[in-house]
Amino acid sequence: MTRFILILFLILTQLLLAFDYAFAAAAVTAATGGSAISADTAGGSYTALTGPVISEGVTADIGIGTIILNVPSGFIFDTGGTAPTVLVTRIAGSGPNTRNINNVASGTSLAITSITTAQITFTVTDFTSNGVRNSLTWQNVRVRPSAGAPLASGNITKSGTSSIVGVNGTTNFGTLTETAGAKNQLVYTTQPSSSATVATDFATKPVIAVRDQFGNTVTSDSSTTITRTVVLSTQTCGGTSGTGTLTSTPASGAAVTAGVMTYTAMQYSVGESIKICASSSGVTSALSDTITVNNPVPTTTSISPTSKTAGDSGFTLTVNGTNFVSSSVVRFNGSSRTTTFVSSTQLTAAILTGDLTTAGTFSITVFNTTPGGGTSNTQTFTVNAAADTTAPAAVSNLALSNPTTSSLDLAWTAPGDDNNSGTAATYDIRYSTANITDGNFSSATQVTGEPAPQVAGTSQSMTVTGLSANTTYYFAMKTSDEAPNTSALSNVPSLATSAAADTTAPAAISNLTASNPTTSSIDLAWTAPGDDNNSGTAATYDIRYSTANITDGNFSSATQVTGEPTPQVAGTSQSMTVTGLSANTTYYFAMKTSDEAPNTSALSNVPSAATLESADTTAPAAITDLVASDATVSSIKLTWNSPGDDDNMGTATSYDIRYSTLPITESNFSAVTQLAGEPSPAAAGASQNVTVTGLAQDTTYYFAMKTSDEAPNISALSNVVSLATLSEIISPVIIPERDGQVVFPTSVSFSGRAYPGGRVKFFRRSMIDIRETNTYVLDTETTADSSGRFEKKFQALLQGAYFFAVEARDRDNRSSGILSFTVNLISNNKLNADNIFVAPTVDFDPSTATKGNDVKVFGYASPDSLVEIELDKILRYNARSNQQGYYSIAVNTSRFSPKEHFLKAWQVDALGNQSPVSPIKTFKITLLSNPKADFNNDNIINIVDWSIFLFRWRSQDVNLKKLSDLDTNNKVDIVDLSIFLKAIKG
């Protein structure tokens, strides 16, 4: 008994302790208002919460320290607007305010310590005492989602240094749940099958969701109705509708369930490629992927009727089977017939009267069109033969031709077995020297070896031999079928065989005249000779012309005219006009006449006449090899090969040379500065030059030119070249020596960086040494070492003013441009020009590119330098040179317009030192597939380029001829001709 009482006492003690702890622990009332926060508020408005609240238990255990509310992942607190506060409320006990948390009166709203988007911090500086218990209520707490998707949810939790009995880091201070926003769009979450069969349930049925702007399914929506329509696969929603009918479960117009429409059945009635458009009011429609609905392969089981008699009228054929569709076509012996769709198991077709003309067996098939589809098995339809009572038609076009001394040719069109249908059986062909009639046909001579009749309408012929010369013969024929039914008598033509062999030639024409010349034609006139000398009618004329006198010896090599008239009876005046002649040219004419033997006459007289001179409409060719060189501080030399008066032939009249500090185009050519004193054009192909003076120093100039003839016809714009004048850099004055005299250098040293293995050329010009010409002269050159460095010293120079210039050339002889220096040499001192950093060289491959292809920009710089490339003063590209100084970069031309583009480059070393800018280079973008064939650079490959190609092709100037090397193999041959012809065809 004592043991029982002890156990009972222990149980009661534990229960009391547990009750006391529970009663002593603080109570947390979670914040409300956050159970359905719309995703649409992400980045927008905030949702206000009520609470949370912490209420102290009997032990009043909210300790000193920080209470931090932590927002769950996917949400943020509002850090703007009215800041949250914490309301202190006395819920038990009495006495002064100093017994409350932070010693404030009940009902006081305390400021929070700090707030971020993730945490709200409140600091407890003093706790309750003497039996007083408080509650803390958070006010003005506002939250919103941090993103529209994925949907977030979680609890506000507590951290911080304040200890609260019964509250830890997992205690729920308020549950926040992000819900989908307003419905915005329809989305296929499951696409229908990509292929299906007509009138058969899709293997995969679509599933469509109603989603908000962020792609969240609006599960709260069970009212949106979805209307589905069918469009052809090439269309979008609202485009051309499909021709069939789409049925489904649920039907079109049904409402979604929890934001989702799931189709359990779906099929389409017509074979074609379609898309399904799902739409609903107020939301964006959804368009499915392409569904290819295939027609099935049809099968036939029977036809009715199965036979007819030849000659019957057309009728309706019934075809039974399976897998018939609305587009099914019945074919009679492979030919489609008008078909009516009755059901998937029956079709009817209109069989034509023409299908029943010939006895035999014929195939009946059904064809289903693509997609899918195919041809069915075959049913046999029989056309039974009718009794043959119809004779072949009479031949009505029997004709005779090609007489010889012993034969005549016969020709006719085959009749049919029945009139003009089918194929007859035999021919009976006869001839006589008297007219043939039905009455004497059987007594006329029958030919031997008649051909077998061919199908009606076929042209047939034969040659009848063994005839007498110079005799008129009459021919007639009859045709029989297999019955036999015999035709009526044919027409009866007649023709005479030839007389004995003709050995007399026509007379030679002696009065051939040439008159009425135009720029391209001359009239000829003569009197017709005869077949035999000047008797009868000859057979043909052979009229020829040449720019040289015509004789019997060269007659056959002269050009034969086309369209000579047929000879008329002897003594008739005849004439013709010869066209296609060249202007301003003397032509000689001659002719011969032949009879039918043929015997050919002697050569006629040989008259001559000159065509008229034509107006000049051909402009000079555009200059394509303009080069700018030999720059000084104020001048640049231009060099080119002269074009001709007409394209590349002759001598033009004048040049129009212009220059500008901006790129020159066809549109601004007339507005830029014209050079005064241009030279007169030389004969086509000659090298010409002019020096443009009065230019500003250290300035890039662009040059272009046009050529005119006397008409005047003006050429297209030449290639546009550019070059910079030299700069005049005055050397600094050296600080005076103690004696007060200014000291100037008497020797000059140059050193710097160029390209590994490149040549560095030095030019010098003395202003006082009259033994030198007033131009830069090459003084010496050196080779840069493997690091690109170079050095050169000029010593023992006479006193006075000197100009120096430095030019670097890479291993492929490309130039850096020229750097110039000016020094005054007066006394015995030195000047060092150190750290010269030359510009990189620049080149293109190709220099003219088809839009969309890459252009390779490349050249040489100092080793391991950054090469900066500027295109059209807009685009920038970077490349890094290797240890040999070589750099390259591929520039895609897809976004470039078809025209000339401008490029310059500079290099920057590891210390940030920048070189001068390279000379400006140009390359061209064109829409042509083979721009090299555009010889006159007008963006069209046409007859002008063809003329240039031919002119260069036959030129003896090797350099000019090489300009037609289209396959870049250093020779011009038939391959280049083939490439050009392909280019001109487009």
Image: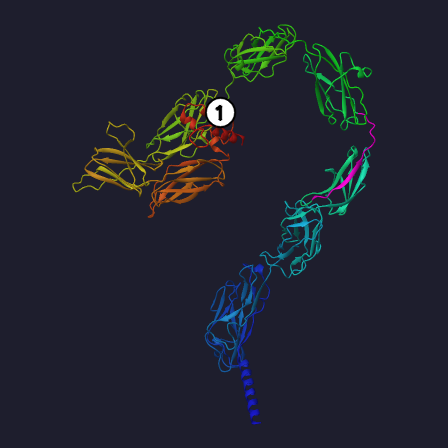
Amino acid carrying label 1: it is Ser
**Side of 225 where 915 appears, left or right:** left
- Front position in the image: 370 or 623: 370
Q: Residue at x 72, y 45 (%)?
A: 298
Work out which quarter of the rendered image holds the N terminus and state it. Answer: bottom right
User: Few, some or many C-alpha atoms within 10 Å of disc 1 (few <14, some 14-19, many ≥20)?
Assistant: some
**Residue 757 belongs to magenta span:** no
- Front position in the image: 900 or 828: 900
Magenta range: 374-391
Where residue 263 sits in the image (x, y, percent)?
Answer: 68, 56
**Side of 29 where 350 appears, left or right:** right
**Side of 297 where 700 appears, left or right:** left
The reply to whether residue 433 is visible in this rendering is: yes
Image-quadrant location for residue 496: top right
Dot 1 falls on a residue whose secondary structure is: helix
Q: Is residue 396 above or below residue 17?
A: above
Q: Looking at this view, name the residue that lies furthest to the left.
A: 739
The reply to whether residue 342 is visible in this rendering is: no
Where residue 908 sits in the image (x, y, percent)?
Answer: 35, 45
Work out which quarter of the rendered image holds the C terminus and state it. Answer: top right
- Front position in the image: 661 or 466: 466
Image-quadrant location for residue 349: top right
Where residue 573 sits in the image (x, y, percent)?
Answer: 63, 8
Q: Is residue 700 above or below residue 152?
A: above
Which residue is identified by label 1?
947
